[in-house]
Amino acid sequence: KQEVTQIPAALSVPEGENLVLNCSFTDSAIYNLQWFRQDPGKGLTSLLLIQSSQREQTSGRLNASLDKSSGRSTLYIAASQPGDSATYLCAVRPNTGNQFYFGTGTSLTVIP
Amino acid sequence: EAQVTQNPRYLITVTGKKLTVTCSQNMNHEYMSWYRQDPGLGLRQIYYSMNVEVTDKGDVPEGYKVSRKEKRNFPLILESPSPNQTSLYFCASSLRYPASGVNNEQFFGPGTRLTVL
């Protein structure tokens, strides 16, 4: 069974800093990996989807990378802003089976 | 607007009283799924459906039922809720899986906060 880990569980940075969030998974046979943002008490908003054949995806100040062989993905946030404060989740879709596996998330606080 | 809707958004009930949480999507997605989210445990998949009349268990199916009679709807049924089912529930949908070359990202509903007393 796929296991997905996100470390650290919480991160606090001053506004303007660049930062990296980590996601690791135990089985490299994945179909895709998706990063989400969740605001307190709210639903999940999709940020980036990386297919297994891709190495990275970019959207605005966000860049997600994927290294299947090492079982890792990173989400890079450039020039962080207080509005980026949220919990960031990664989810893995394996090559076989029809389930998704989520990490427990990294809670990000950007201090003005 | 493409979206996944859930109702109700908040529900307080008592042990043993049957309830249904509805989920509907307007994107013609084949794949639909239910998750629960608990502190420290993250999101765990309850049930999923690959298409109409095709459903399967996720990691935590005990105490739940689902049905998929129409493509757009995927209700979650708790026949006899218990306090350990107090949680935040999310419905999600995506295009069929696997599908080469298709952007099958998951779209999530706003969540249903359920409290079972």
Image: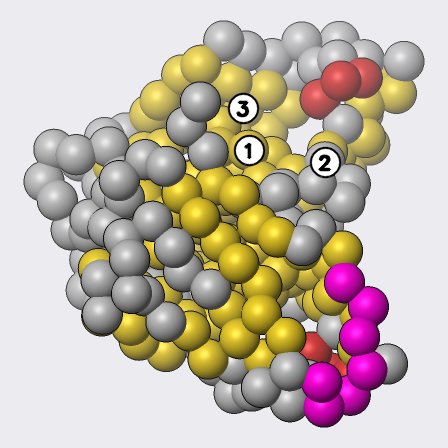
The residue identified by callout 1 is A45
**Reading the chain from its start, which is encountered first: label 1 or label 3?**
1
Q: Please rate how many residues cluster around mark 3, counting C-alpha atoms within 10 Å: few if below 14, some from 14 to 19, many from 20.
A: some
Q: Is residue A35 above or below residue B80?
A: above
- Residue stretch in magenta: B11-17
Q: Is residue B13 magenta?
A: yes
> Which residue is pictured at 15% across the width and 51% down the height?
B98
The residue identified by callout 3 is A76
Q: Please rate how many residues cluster around mark 2, counting C-alpha atoms within 10 Å: few if below 14, some from 14 to 19, many from 20.
A: some
Disc 1 vs disc 2: Cβ atoms closer than 8 Å? yes
Q: Secondary structure at mark 1?
A: strand
Q: Residue B96: x percent and y percent?
A: 20, 48
Q: CA distance from mark 2 to mark 3?
A: 18 Å
Q: Nearer the viewer, mark 1 or mark 3?
A: 1
Amino acid at the residue labelled 3: Tyr
Are the residues under badges 2 and 3 in a single subunit? Answer: yes
Amino acid at the residue labelled 1: Thr
> Which residue is pictured at 81% across the width and 23% down the height?
A110
Between A59 and B82, the one nearer to me in the picture: B82
Q: Secondary structure at mark 3?
A: strand
Mark 2 falls within which chain? A
Are the residues under badges 1 and 3 in a single subunit? Answer: yes
The residue identified by callout 2 is A39
> Which residue is pictured at 44% across the width and 22% down the height?
B1
